Image (cartoon, rainbow, N blue to C red):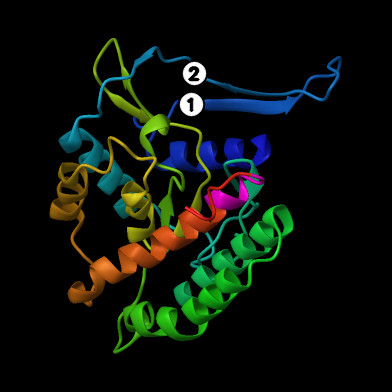
Amino acid sequence: MLEGEFNSMVELYKTSPNFVPKPYAWGQLSVSRPATYYLLCDFIEMGNKNPDPVQLATKLVQLHQSSKSPTGMFGFHIDTCQGSLPQQTAWNQSWVDFYIQLVRGAMALNTERNGNWKNLEQLVDRLITHVVPQVLGPLEADGRVVKPTLIHGDLWDGNIGTNLENGELYIFDASAYYAHNEMEIAMWRARFCKTMSAKIYLNSYLNRMGISKPVDQFEDRNRIYSVYMTLHESACHNGSNFREE
C-alpha cells in the first residue's frame, strides 16, 4: 500500500514540486510487531480551512497539462491503492478499455469483500457492455484522442491541505495513475466530499482546463467516472451498508 503511495508521490512531485510534499523513502520497520511501515516526506504544517478554488484549479491544471505518460498509455508502473485496496492499473492503450479494467477490478474486490449481489453484478455488466461504449467511446472517435494525464487519484477533502506559513496548497495520500483528466474531478460529486462538492471547485477547474469533446456528454462521463470511485470505496468498507447506500 505505502509502496504505491510513495511511487505516486514521486511521480506527482516530478511534475508539480510546488503542489506535493517532497517524498524521500518508504519501507518496513525491522523491529515492529505487527508489521509496520513508514513513508518519509517533507513536513509541512497545514491547516484545515477550505482550499482556495482558484489556486487549487490553477495547480491542478498545471499538473494535468504538464504530465506525460512514460509509455504513452493509461495506467501506472505499479498498482496503487485507493483506500486500503489496490487498483488495477496495468498499462492499456485505450482509455475505454482501461476504465473497464478499473471497474472490473473494483467489482471483483466488492464481491470478495462483501459477497455476491446479483442486482449490482447485472448493473455493472450493463455499464460495461452498453453505457461505457456509448458515453466514453466518443472520446476516442472521429479522430479524437484522450491524453493519458497523471492524476492524484483520490483527491477528496481530506487529501488537500493549506501551508500555514505561506498559504500554498498541497496534495498528499495519492493513488496516482495516468487517466483521462476528467477522472480526477469525478470524486467531487461523492457524498463524502463535503467541501469539494461545491460547484465553485468544479467550475474553477473546467474554466481553466476546458471540457473534453463531446462537451454535451461531460455530465454523463462525470457520473460514470464516479461509479468507479464509489464501487471501489464500497469494497473498502466490507461488512457495512456502504454498498447498499
The residue under label 2 is which amino acid type? Asp
Q: Percent x, y for residue 187? A: 38, 50
> In the rendered image, is residue 92 in sight?
no
Q: Position of residue 62 (x, y in %)?
A: 27, 45
Residue 120 drawn above or below residue 204: below
Where residue 231 sits: x, y (%)?
53, 58
Give the residue at mark 1: 22
Tell me, yes or no, whether the two marked residues, 2 and 1, touch with CB atoms within 8 Å: yes
Rendering coords of residue 172 (x, y %):
46, 32
Asked if one can make out residue 58 in the rendered structure from this viewpoint, the answer is yes
Highlighted range, magenta? 233-239
Q: Is residue 147 above or below residue 97?
A: above
Q: Which residue is mark 2?
A: 42
Residue at image location 46% in from the left, 48% down from the top:
153
For the residue pair 214 and 14, the one nearer the viewer reads as: 214
Counting other residues with Cα less than 10 Å from the Cα at mark 2, is it few (<14), some (14-19), or many (20 or more)?
A: few
Whether residue 232 is in magenta: the answer is no
